[in-house]
Image (cartoon, helix red, strand yellow):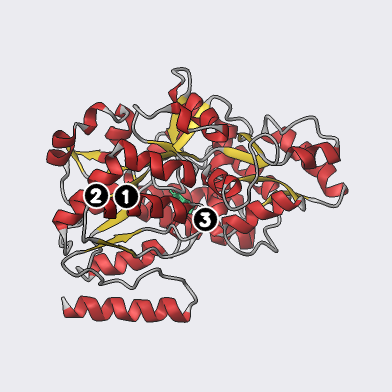
C-alpha cells in the first residue's frame, strides 16, 4: 500500500511539474470521504460533476465528495495517471471509464468489480438501452454505471460566420467540405479548427465514418475490413486533405480553445463531441441555432456515433460502500438530470424527461430515440478499440503528421490491429 502511495506521490509531483492541474491528489479518502476520479475540470463539465456531487453529499450526510479530476480532454492525462495508480493497487473509490472496449481491459485484468447484483437491485437493466448495456457487459456480467450518452460525429459552426462568407450551409460530404475549405482559405480564414492529438484522432474517426459509411466503419474496427484496401486508402487520403485545411500547425490548447476559434470567427468549423454544447451554452452563453449550431459531420447524417461516460467500482477501493452509493447516484434519474444539461450530454436512462433537455440537447435526444438512427461507437472515446490498439493508433497518427506517409499508416494500423487483439 505504502509503495502505491509513494508511486502516486511521485506522479502527483510529475503532474505538478508538468503543469497538469489535479483537483485532489490521489490517495485521498478517509472513512467518510469518497474519492471520484475523472477528467472533468473544464467550465461546463466541472459544473455538471459538481451538481451530481452536491446531491450525493446531501443524500449521504457527513460524507465528503473528494474530486480527484485530472485535466486534459478525453482523459489525455488522467488515463495515464490512473493506469499507474491501478498498477500500484491504489485506486480511487470510483473512476470514469468509457463504455466499450476501453472498459474491457480493466475487467480482464481484474481491476473493477462486478456490478451485476447492484444492477438487479436498482432495476437498471430496464431503464438503459440494450446496446449500451451490451457495451458494459462482459461474459454476462456488468461492470460500470453510465451517466450519459455523448455524440461524437458533429460539426460545429456559427451561423454568423457562414453568412459572412456567403455559405448557404455546412457541408454534407467531405468533398463538399474541401470545396468550401478552398474558398474559406482564400477569404483568409481557417476552414477547420483543431486541437491536441486526441482531437485529431476524433477528426480521423469522423472522416472515416463519413467516407466509408456506418457498415464499413464498423467492419474496419471489427477487423473484417483491412486498412490497406483501396477503399480505406481513399478515405485516409481524404483525411489528409481535410487536415491540410486545418490549423494543425499552430493549434494549441485543448478542445475549448478549438471551439473558441469558431466562436470568435477566425475558424469556420470544428469537429467535436457534444460536450461542446455544455461549454457553449454555459460559460460561453451562446444559444443553439443563434450563436452556434451543429450538424452531423459530413457524410454521417442519420448516424449517431456514440460514447458513454461511466463510473466503476475498482477492486481495492478504500470505501466500496460509499462508492456503491455514488454509483446509485450516477444511475439515478435525479443524478443524470442534474449532470447532463450542464455537461452537454443526454441521459443514459431511457426514462428521462425530454423537457429538461432544450436546445441542442433536445435535438440530440430526438435523434438518439429515433428508431431510424443508426448507432455506431467512437474510436477516440473508447467504444470500438481497446486501449492497446488505441495507443498504437495514437503513435501511428503522430508519425503520420510528420511523414504524411499514407501507405505506411495503413500497413501499421493493419499490423497493430492483429498484434493488439
Ligand atoms: C470524452 C468524454 C467526455 C468529455 C470529452 C472531452 O472522452 O467522454 O465526457 O470529457 O472527452 O474531454
**Residue mark closest to the camera, 3 vs 1:** 1
Gap in angstroms between the C-alphas marked 3 and 1: 32 Å
Instruction: Pick whichever of labels 3 and 1 is earlier in the sequence.
Output: 1
Q: Give the labeled residue for mark 3.
A: 198
Measured as percent of width and height from the top left, residue 205 is found at: 53, 43
Ligand 1 neighbours mark 3 (CB distance < 8 Å): yes
Measured as percent of width and height from the top left, residue 311 is found at: 29, 49
Measured as percent of width and height from the top left, residue 1 is found at: 15, 75
Q: Give the labeled residue for mark 2.
A: 59
In the displayed structure, 180 sits above or below 189; it is above
Q: Give the labeled residue for mark 1.
A: 55
For the residue pair 109 and 314, the one nearer the viewer reads as 314
In the displayed structure, 372 sits above or below 135; it is above
Question: In the image, which disc is placed on residue 279?
Answer: none
Residue at 28 percent of width and 52 percent of height:
58
Gap in angstroms between the C-alphas marked 2 and 1: 6 Å
Q: Is residue 168 left or right of residue 230?
A: right
Callout 2 touching callout 3 (CB < 8 Å): no
Amino acid at each position: 500500500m505504502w509503495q502505491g502511495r509513494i508511486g502516486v506521490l511521485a506522479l502527483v509531483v510529475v503532474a505538478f511539474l508538468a503543469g497538469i492541474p489535479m483537483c485532489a491528489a490521489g490517495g485521498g479518502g478517509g472513512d467518510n470521504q469518497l474519492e471520484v476520479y475523472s477528467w472533468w475540470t473544464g467550465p461546463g463539465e466541472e459544473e455538471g460533476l459538481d451538481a451530481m456531487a452536491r446531491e450525493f453529499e446531501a443524500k449521504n450526510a457527513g460524507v465528503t465528495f473528494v474530486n480527484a479530476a485530472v485535466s486534459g480532454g478525453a482523459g489525455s492525462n488522467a488515463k495515464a495517471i490512473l493506469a499507474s495508480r491501478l498498477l500500484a493497487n491504489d485506486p480511487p473509490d470510483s473512476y470514469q471509464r468509457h463504455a466499450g472496449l476501453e472498459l474491457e481491459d480493466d475487467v480482464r485484468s481484474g481491476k473493477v468489480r462486478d456490478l451485476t447484483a447492484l444492477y438487479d437491485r436498482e432495476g437498471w437493466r430496464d431503464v438503459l438501452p440494450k446496446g449500451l448495456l451490451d457495451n458494459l457487459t462482459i461474459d454476462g456480467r456488468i461492470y460500470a454505471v453510465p451517466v450519459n450518452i455523448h455524440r461524437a460525429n458533429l460539426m460545429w459552426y456559427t451561423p454568423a460566420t457562414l453568412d459572412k462568407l456567403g455559405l448557404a450551409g455546412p457541408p454534407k460530404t467531405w468533398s463538399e467540405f474541401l470545396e468550401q475549405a478552398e474558398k474559406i482559405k482564400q477569404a483568409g480564414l481557417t476552414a477547420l479548427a483543431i486541437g491536441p492529438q486526441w482531437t485529431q484522432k476524433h477528426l480521423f474517426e469522423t472522416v472515416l465514418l463519413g467516407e466509408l459509411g456506418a457498415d464499413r466503419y464498423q467492419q474496419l474496427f471489427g477487423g473484417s475490413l483491412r486498412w490497406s484496401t483501396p477503399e480505406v486508402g481513399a478515405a485516409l487520403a481524404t483525411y489528409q486533405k481535410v487536415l491540410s485545411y486545418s490549423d494543425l500547425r499552430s493549434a494549441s490548447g485543448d478542445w475549448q480553445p478549438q471551439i473558441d476559434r469558431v466562436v470568435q470567427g477566425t475558424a469556420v468549423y470544428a469537429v467535436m463531441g457534444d460536450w461542446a454544447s455544455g461549454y457553449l451554452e454555459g460559460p460561453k452563453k451562446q444559444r443553439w441555432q443563434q450563436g452556434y449550431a451543429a450538424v452531423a459531420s459530413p457524410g454521417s447524417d442519420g448516424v449517431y456515433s456514440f460514447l458513454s461516460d461511466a463510473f466503476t467500482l475498482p477492486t481495492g477501493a478504500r470505501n466500496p460502500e460509499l462508492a456503491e452509493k455514488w454509483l446509485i447516484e450516477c444511475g439515478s434519474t435525479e443524478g443524470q438530470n442534474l449532470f447532463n444539461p450542464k455537461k452537454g450530454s443526454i441521459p443514459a436512462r431511457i426514462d428521462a424527461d425530454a423537457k429538461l433537455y432544450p436546445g441542442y440537447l433536445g435535438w440530440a435526444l430526438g435523434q438518439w430515440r429515433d428508431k431510424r438512427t443508426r448507432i455506431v461507437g467512437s474510436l477516440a472515446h473508447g467504444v470500438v478499440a481497446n486501449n492497446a490498439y488505441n495507443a498504437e493508433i495514437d503513435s501511428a497518427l503522430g508519425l503520420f503528421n510528420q511523414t504524411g506517409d499514407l501507405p505506411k499508416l495503413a500497413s501499421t494500423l493493419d499490423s497493430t490491429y492483429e498484434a493488439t487483439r
